[in-house]
Amino acid sequence: SEYPILQWYWNTFSSTMVVMAGNLIFPVMAGYALAKLQFPGRKLIFSILLVSMMVPFQLIMIQMYIMLAKMELHNTIWAISLPFLSQTMYMFISRQFFYSVPDELIEAGRIDGLSHAGAFIRIVCPMAKSLFATIAILVFTGTWNSYLVPATFINNIDKYTLVVGLQTVNMTYFQKTNLTMAGVVLLSFPVILFFIINQKQFVEGIMSSGIK
Protein backbone atom coordinates (compact mmCIF):
# COMPACT_ATOMS: atom_id res chain seq x y z
CA SER A 1 0.00 0.00 0.00
CA GLU A 2 0.97 3.65 -0.26
CA TYR A 3 1.32 3.96 3.52
CA PRO A 4 2.76 0.84 5.27
CA ILE A 5 1.00 1.38 8.60
CA LEU A 6 1.72 -2.14 9.85
CA GLN A 7 5.41 -1.60 9.17
CA TRP A 8 5.24 1.70 11.06
CA TYR A 9 3.64 -0.14 13.95
CA TRP A 10 6.44 -2.69 13.97
CA ASN A 11 9.14 0.00 13.75
CA THR A 12 7.60 1.86 16.68
CA PHE A 13 7.08 -1.28 18.73
CA SER A 14 10.59 -2.66 18.17
CA SER A 15 12.36 0.63 18.91
CA THR A 16 10.20 1.19 21.99
CA MET A 17 10.92 -2.29 23.34
CA VAL A 18 14.67 -1.89 22.81
CA VAL A 19 14.75 1.51 24.54
CA MET A 20 12.56 0.27 27.39
CA ALA A 21 14.70 -2.83 27.95
CA GLY A 22 17.85 -0.73 28.06
CA ASN A 23 16.39 1.74 30.55
CA LEU A 24 15.13 -1.07 32.77
CA ILE A 25 18.69 -2.41 33.03
CA PHE A 26 21.41 0.23 32.76
CA PRO A 27 19.96 3.24 34.66
CA VAL A 28 18.61 0.96 37.40
CA MET A 29 22.02 -0.66 37.92
CA ALA A 30 23.72 2.74 37.87
CA GLY A 31 21.17 4.15 40.31
CA TYR A 32 21.78 1.25 42.69
CA ALA A 33 25.55 1.75 42.50
CA LEU A 34 25.24 5.49 43.18
CA ALA A 35 22.90 4.88 46.13
CA LYS A 36 24.39 1.85 47.86
CA LEU A 37 27.98 1.27 46.78
CA GLN A 38 30.89 3.22 48.24
CA PHE A 39 33.55 4.23 45.71
CA PRO A 40 35.69 7.32 45.05
CA GLY A 41 34.03 10.07 43.01
CA ARG A 42 30.48 8.87 43.60
CA LYS A 43 29.15 12.34 44.46
CA LEU A 44 31.10 13.91 41.59
CA ILE A 45 29.62 11.46 39.09
CA PHE A 46 26.13 12.15 40.38
CA SER A 47 26.71 15.91 40.12
CA ILE A 48 27.87 15.54 36.53
CA LEU A 49 24.75 13.52 35.75
CA LEU A 50 22.56 16.25 37.22
CA VAL A 51 24.33 18.91 35.16
CA SER A 52 23.91 16.82 32.01
CA MET A 53 20.14 16.81 32.59
CA MET A 54 20.16 20.60 32.24
CA VAL A 55 21.58 20.47 28.71
CA PRO A 56 18.76 20.73 26.12
CA PHE A 57 18.60 17.74 23.81
CA GLN A 58 18.32 20.05 20.78
CA LEU A 59 21.81 21.27 21.59
CA ILE A 60 23.40 17.86 20.98
CA MET A 61 20.99 16.47 18.40
CA ILE A 62 23.02 17.57 15.35
CA GLN A 63 26.25 16.14 16.80
CA MET A 64 24.40 12.91 17.55
CA TYR A 65 23.15 12.74 13.96
CA ILE A 66 26.67 13.29 12.59
CA MET A 67 28.02 10.53 14.84
CA LEU A 68 25.28 8.11 13.75
CA ALA A 69 25.89 8.99 10.10
CA LYS A 70 29.59 8.20 10.46
CA MET A 71 28.64 4.84 11.96
CA GLU A 72 26.16 4.34 9.08
CA LEU A 73 23.30 3.93 11.54
CA HIS A 74 21.25 6.92 10.42
CA ASN A 75 17.99 6.14 8.65
CA THR A 76 17.70 2.90 10.64
CA ILE A 77 15.71 1.85 13.68
CA TRP A 78 18.97 1.70 15.67
CA ALA A 79 19.39 5.44 15.21
CA ILE A 80 16.34 6.07 17.40
CA SER A 81 17.14 3.29 19.86
CA LEU A 82 20.85 3.04 20.70
CA PRO A 83 21.42 6.66 21.88
CA PHE A 84 18.55 6.35 24.35
CA LEU A 85 19.27 2.99 26.00
CA SER A 86 20.35 4.70 29.22
CA GLN A 87 18.75 8.02 30.13
CA THR A 88 19.95 10.16 33.00
CA MET A 89 16.51 10.91 34.39
CA TYR A 90 15.89 7.24 35.14
CA MET A 91 19.28 6.98 36.86
CA PHE A 92 18.18 9.79 39.13
CA ILE A 93 14.80 8.17 39.82
CA SER A 94 16.48 4.82 40.54
CA ARG A 95 19.04 6.37 42.87
CA GLN A 96 16.36 8.14 44.89
CA PHE A 97 14.32 4.92 45.13
CA PHE A 98 17.24 2.76 46.26
CA TYR A 99 18.12 5.25 48.99
CA SER A 100 14.87 4.18 50.66
CA VAL A 101 15.89 0.49 50.71
CA PRO A 102 17.25 -0.38 54.20
CA ASP A 103 20.96 -1.12 54.22
CA GLU A 104 20.31 -3.87 56.78
CA LEU A 105 18.59 -6.02 54.14
CA ILE A 106 21.55 -5.80 51.80
CA GLU A 107 24.02 -6.41 54.61
CA ALA A 108 22.05 -9.50 55.67
CA GLY A 109 22.32 -10.85 52.15
CA ARG A 110 26.03 -10.11 52.09
CA ILE A 111 26.48 -12.00 55.37
CA ASP A 112 24.67 -14.97 53.81
CA GLY A 113 27.29 -15.03 51.09
CA LEU A 114 25.68 -12.95 48.33
CA SER A 115 27.80 -10.66 46.21
CA HIS A 116 26.73 -7.10 45.48
CA ALA A 117 25.21 -8.33 42.21
CA GLY A 118 23.47 -11.19 44.00
CA ALA A 119 22.03 -8.87 46.65
CA PHE A 120 20.82 -6.54 43.93
CA ILE A 121 19.14 -9.27 41.89
CA ARG A 122 17.72 -11.44 44.69
CA ILE A 123 16.88 -8.86 47.37
CA VAL A 124 16.58 -5.37 45.90
CA CYS A 125 14.96 -6.05 42.52
CA PRO A 126 11.93 -7.90 43.95
CA MET A 127 11.32 -4.83 46.13
CA ALA A 128 11.55 -2.48 43.15
CA LYS A 129 8.49 -3.55 41.14
CA SER A 130 6.98 -0.08 41.42
CA LEU A 131 10.24 1.45 40.19
CA PHE A 132 10.36 -0.85 37.17
CA ALA A 133 6.69 -0.14 36.40
CA THR A 134 7.22 3.62 36.64
CA ILE A 135 10.26 3.58 34.37
CA ALA A 136 8.52 1.25 31.90
CA ILE A 137 5.46 3.51 31.65
CA LEU A 138 7.51 6.69 31.25
CA VAL A 139 9.85 5.15 28.66
CA PHE A 140 7.05 3.48 26.72
CA THR A 141 4.97 6.67 26.57
CA GLY A 142 7.90 8.92 25.71
CA THR A 143 9.39 6.65 23.03
CA TRP A 144 6.09 5.63 21.45
CA ASN A 145 5.01 9.27 21.09
CA SER A 146 8.43 10.62 20.10
CA TYR A 147 8.37 12.76 16.95
CA LEU A 148 11.46 14.98 16.82
CA VAL A 149 14.09 12.23 16.86
CA PRO A 150 12.47 9.86 14.30
CA ALA A 151 11.58 12.75 12.01
CA THR A 152 15.19 14.00 12.12
CA PHE A 153 17.12 10.72 11.96
CA ILE A 154 14.91 8.80 9.51
CA ASN A 155 13.77 9.83 6.02
CA ASN A 156 12.87 6.45 4.51
CA ILE A 157 9.10 5.95 4.57
CA ASP A 158 9.49 2.23 5.31
CA LYS A 159 11.53 3.10 8.43
CA TYR A 160 9.10 5.69 9.80
CA THR A 161 7.66 5.31 13.25
CA LEU A 162 3.91 5.52 13.71
CA VAL A 163 3.91 9.16 14.83
CA VAL A 164 5.96 10.36 11.84
CA GLY A 165 4.00 8.20 9.41
CA LEU A 166 0.60 9.34 10.65
CA GLN A 167 1.76 12.95 10.52
CA THR A 168 2.68 12.36 6.87
CA VAL A 169 -0.80 10.96 6.20
CA ASN A 170 -2.38 13.87 8.06
CA MET A 171 -0.48 16.40 5.95
CA THR A 172 -1.69 14.64 2.79
CA TYR A 173 -5.33 14.24 3.85
CA PHE A 174 -5.60 17.22 6.19
CA GLN A 175 -9.31 17.84 5.61
CA LYS A 176 -10.41 14.22 6.13
CA THR A 177 -11.36 14.19 9.80
CA ASN A 178 -12.18 10.47 9.81
CA LEU A 179 -8.61 9.54 8.83
CA THR A 180 -7.20 11.92 11.42
CA MET A 181 -9.34 10.42 14.21
CA ALA A 182 -8.43 6.89 13.11
CA GLY A 183 -4.77 7.84 13.36
CA VAL A 184 -5.29 9.19 16.89
CA VAL A 185 -6.87 5.88 17.96
CA LEU A 186 -4.04 3.85 16.39
CA LEU A 187 -1.49 5.97 18.21
CA SER A 188 -3.19 6.17 21.61
CA PHE A 189 -4.54 2.65 22.11
CA PRO A 190 -1.20 0.87 22.83
CA VAL A 191 -0.19 3.54 25.37
CA ILE A 192 -3.52 3.30 27.21
CA LEU A 193 -3.36 -0.50 27.21
CA PHE A 194 0.22 -0.51 28.52
CA PHE A 195 -0.70 1.86 31.35
CA ILE A 196 -3.71 -0.25 32.34
CA ILE A 197 -1.49 -3.34 32.56
CA ASN A 198 1.07 -1.61 34.80
CA GLN A 199 -1.12 0.81 36.73
CA LYS A 200 -1.23 -1.30 39.90
CA GLN A 201 2.52 -1.16 40.47
CA PHE A 202 2.63 2.49 39.34
CA VAL A 203 -0.03 3.55 41.87
CA GLU A 204 1.62 1.48 44.63
CA GLY A 205 4.87 3.32 43.98
CA ILE A 206 3.17 6.71 44.27
CA MET A 207 1.40 5.68 47.49
CA SER A 208 4.57 4.29 49.08
CA SER A 209 6.54 7.44 48.22
CA GLY A 210 3.79 9.51 49.81
CA ILE A 211 3.89 7.45 52.99
CA LYS A 212 7.66 7.83 53.25
Image (tube, rainbow, N blue to C red):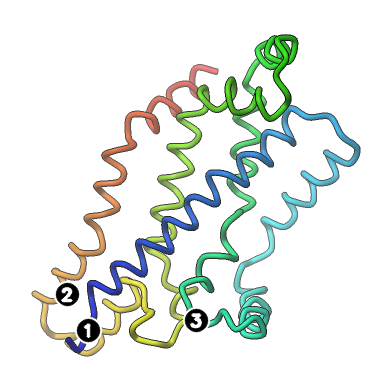
SS at mark 3 in the image: helix
The disc, 2 or 1, on the residue closer to the chain's N-terminal end is 1
The disc, 2 or 3, on the residue closer to the chain's N-terminal end is 3
Check the picture and name the quadrant holding the N terminus.
Answer: bottom left
Q: Residue furthest left?
A: 178
User: Where is residue 87 shown, x and y percent of the image?
Assistant: 60, 54
Q: Residue furthest front?
A: 113
User: Where is residue 47 shown, x and y percent of the image?
Assistant: 79, 46
Q: State whether residue 163 is above or below residue 53.
A: below
Residue type at mark 1? Answer: Tyr
Residue type at mark 2? Answer: Thr
Pointer 2 with pointer 3, Cβ within 8 A: no
Q: Is residue 198 left or right of residue 97?
A: left
The residue shown at (36%, 66%) is 12
Q: Which mark is residue 3?
A: 1
Crowding near the residue tagged with mark 2, few <14, some 14–19, many ≥20 C-alpha atoms within 10 Å = some
Q: Choose top left, top right, bottom left or bottom right for residue 25.
A: top right
Q: Which residue is mark 2?
A: 180
Crowding near the residue tagged with mark 1, few <14, some 14–19, many ≥20 C-alpha atoms within 10 Å = few
